[in-house]
Image (cartoon, grey):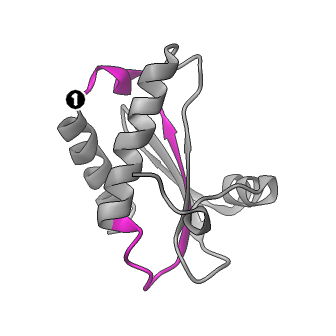
Amino acid sequence: MALPRTQRLTNRADFLRISQQGKTVGDDFFLLRYTPGAVTNNRVAIVISRKAIPLATKRNQLRRIISAWLAEYWCLDTSRPTDLVIGVKAGCAKLKSNQIKISLEQLFRKANLV
């Protein structure tokens, strides 16, 4: 399930603001950059480089899994609006969907976003 446009980061200025002013948390599979949101809802961008995951089908599959998890667990909580960029690392390609969800949940807890 794709995230609605209102919950996606699309503006270059927002990406720059998050990379310059935001906090960073990471593990072996993901890198989270986040900052308090400028609007009233959570916004997210999922970044997967071609160098990390060469096959487009795998990149798209990872985007769908991550988007579904975000829509189900994170985007509904608007008590603390947050702008978030999720970077996917190369090791993530070997994980199954339930392992991806567990890793994301642990990372969000580490960043105090859940």
**Nearer to me, 77 or 25:** 77
Q: Secondary structure at mark 1?
A: loop
Q: Position of residue 11 (x, y in %)?
A: 76, 57
Residue beneath the point at 47% across and 31% down: 60
Q: Is residue 112 visible?
A: no
Residue 43, above or below 41: above
Residue 59 % position (x, y):
47, 27
- Measuring from the top left, give residue 97's x and y in whole percent: 24, 36
Residue occupying the point 60% across, 62% down:
5
Amino acid carrying label 1: it is Lys
Quarter holding residue 27: top left
Q: Which residue is mark 1?
A: 96
User: Which quadrant of the rendered structure holds the C terminus?
Assistant: bottom left
Location of residue 62 by image quarter: top left
Q: Residue at x 18, y 40 (%)?
A: 98
Q: Which residues are magenta?
A: 74-96
Q: Is residue 67 left or right of residue 110?
A: right
